Amino acid sequence: MALLNEIKKMQSEGKTEQEIISSLRQQGIAPREIVEALSQSKIKGAVSGEVPQPEAEASIQNSQEIQQEPAQMMQTEQQYQQMQSQEFAPSQQMQEQQIQYPQEQQYPQTQQMQSMQQTQSQEYPEYQQQYPQEQYQQQSGGISSDTITEIAEQVVSEKFATIKKDMEKIIDLKTTTETKLSYLDSRLKKIEAIIDRLNLSIMQKVGDYMTNIDDIKKELIETQKSFKALAPSLSLDSTTRDKTQRRQHPQPEDSLN
């Protein structure tokens, strides 16, 4: 996983596959691990919907060709050895008659084979040390279905993890919104109750005022009636008082003349 993440990081930086391979080789990572990690990265990118760049595809093909060359050369060497063994394996009669000739003929040819092996070892020393023939045959089969399944499951799990985080955020937002709405609902109910109490108290006050006004009106009517009853007696008293005063203080007739 660390190697795969490092390859992803290099790809995000815009490096080509050849640069990635050389950088990882400088770090001391085996070529087989590099190829497997690159293949996993390519498969993972294909599963997740990422389209690989043409340069990356070309570099992967080049790396595969480079890895296949030592295997082909080793196979060619084995075929050459088989041909040599078939050509220079005389029968028992020839061995009895020609004891020295096969040795003389095989000697320069063995030198040629050794020189070819040395040349191959000089050209591909690292591949011969790190990649025996069985490993090349295993690599030629490609990545197993278990590896592809594991990579696909990893991609799907990452996608589901992202979706799960988004769903958790939505659920938290929903919970917060519902809490706020319930609080606002309770506040509105309290305000409605207060308004109802205010309306009731106002109606009671208005009713009390109307009752008081009716009482005052009745009292005024009774007062008016009592004044009306007292008005004739007061007028009679005033006229009687005037007459009495006139009698007590008569006006002289001379003064009138």
Image (cartoon, rainbow, N blue to C red):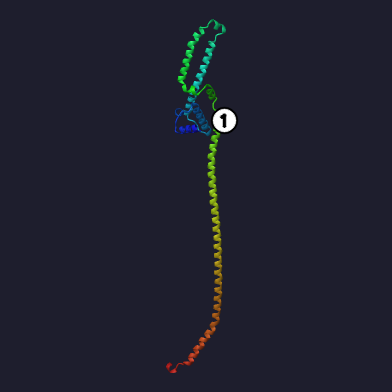
Outermost residue, top direction?
A: 97
Q: Residue at x 44, y 94 (%)?
A: 253
Residue placed most toward the observer, 211 or 24:
24
Of all residues, the one furthest to the bottom in this rendering is 254
Instruction: Give the class, few, some or many, for how many residues have Cα within 10 Å of label 1's Cα (few <14, many ≥20).
Output: few
Q: Residue at x 55, y 48 (%)?
A: 175
Which quarter of the rendered picture does the C terminus lie within? bottom left
Up-down: is 37 above or below 119? below
The residue carrying mark 1 is 146
Foreground: 144 or 32?
32
Please say if 194 is above or below 164: below
Q: Is residue 131 above or below residue 6?
A: above
**Residue at (54, 39) in percent of width and height:** 161
Give percent across and percent down for residue 32. 50, 26
Residue type of the residue flagged with mark 1 = Asp
Give the tally of numbered discs. 1
Which residue is drawn at the image coordinates 55% and 62% (left, top)?
197
Percent position (x, y) of residue 212?
A: 55, 71
Image location (x, y in percent) of residue 193: 56, 59
